[in-house]
Amino acid sequence: MPDSFGQTTDQQRIAELERQISVLSVFHDIGKALTSTLDLSRVLETIMEQISGLFHPDTWSLLLLDPAKQDLYFEIAVGQAAEKLKGIRLKMGEGVAGWVAQRGESVLVSDANTDQRFAPRVDAVTRMETRMIAAVPIRGRDSILGVIELINPPASVQFGEREMLLLQALGDYTAIALENARHMERIHQMTITDDCTQLFNSRHLHNVLESEIYRSGRYGYKFSLVFFDLDHFKQVNDTHGHLVGSRLLAEVGQLIKDHLRMIDLAFRYGGDEFVVLLPQTDRTAAINVARRLHRLVSDAVFLREHEINLRLTASFGLACYPEDATGKDDLIRQADEAMYLVKNTVRNSIAAANVGLLS
């Protein structure tokens, strides 16, 4: 008969084995999610579930670094203060999470109130009492991407070096998921973006038009397409070279993009031809937009950096769906023909499908 000490040891061994199996199951599930999908939200959801199930903290968060603003925002927040946390941003170096992001080091704070890195303003907003913090960096290949932060793990979870290593491993999986998602986003952008102007390309125009036609039929609104072509663009290439010509196209594209509504989309259709898609816009409104774009191009001075100070004109044509066309190819053709009506007659003006030249 084993004594009580032996029984306790066996129970401890069984408990430890069960814990190791649980940990292996966590990483199996996350690894499976990483290899079965490139959907970032699904992978992060799996990581979120595993962190909650493994550590049972009051609150835990995934903070991501905003490279433009150089601060941290709460991409995921789970727990009693989750909703209030989502509106908070932390500067680099601010609070424990900001310190971890700045230094790229893990940290375990056993008493937040006595730690100088702790940011009490977060508790003031969330109205919770932070006692213990475990935070690890999300390390990308070249930079810190964010921080995973656990607040107030339960007393049953004895947080130590082993738990921090597990948490850091989860942070590494998160980094893989984030970088995979960002790589896929870059690849997607490359397939729909014109290299020269950084506007959308003609392939994407056809995809977007299919969606707009569907929405138009379902919700009963009109949309318009504006085509325009730069007058005498060939002379720019012949006089200054193709590199300068490409720079001019980029400047025209940026000028147009800067003066559109949030819902409007600009495309480089090919050569020196541009297209502007105007959702929820009828013919009258589209004519007004075309006139405004026409003035923008005519009034602008291009290639200042090259000390060329070039002025341009452009020929515009527009068509409206559904009154001018029955499908996307017909709409493109109608707008294109209206543009060529201008280009082959007066140039530097505007025409509308089924209307003709506009004064």
Image (cartoon, helix red, strand yellow):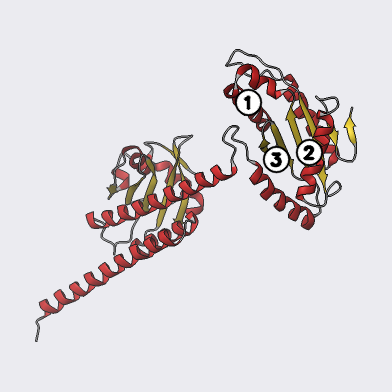
Distance between the alpha carbons at the discs numbered 1 and 2: 22 Å
Query: Badge 1 is on which residue?
Result: 251
Residue closer to the observer: 156 or 14: 14
Secondary element under disc 1, as helix, strand or loop, is helix
Mark 1 or mark 2, which is nearer to you?
Answer: 2
Residue closer to the observer: 280 or 97: 280
Image position, residue 268 (x, y; %): 66, 36
Residue 264 tag number: 3
Q: Earlier in the sequence, mark 1 or mark 2?
A: 1
Amino acid tagged 2: Asp
Q: Earlier in the sequence, mark 3 or mark 1?
A: 1
Quarter that holds the C terminus: top right
Image position, residue 263 (x, y; %): 69, 42
Image position, residue 358 (x, y; %): 88, 30
Q: Earlier in the sequence, mark 2 or mark 3?
A: 3
Verify CB contact (< 8 Å) between mark 3 and mark 1.
no
Query: Badge 2 is on which residue?
Result: 336
Amino acid tagged 3: Asp
What residue appears at the point 31 percent right and 41 percent down from the top-left corner? 104
- Furthest toward the front, the residue is 238
Mark 2 or mark 3, which is nearer to you?
Answer: 2
Mark 3 or mark 1, which is nearer to you?
Answer: 1
Secondary element under disc 3, as helix, strand or loop, is loop
Amino acid tagged 1: Glu
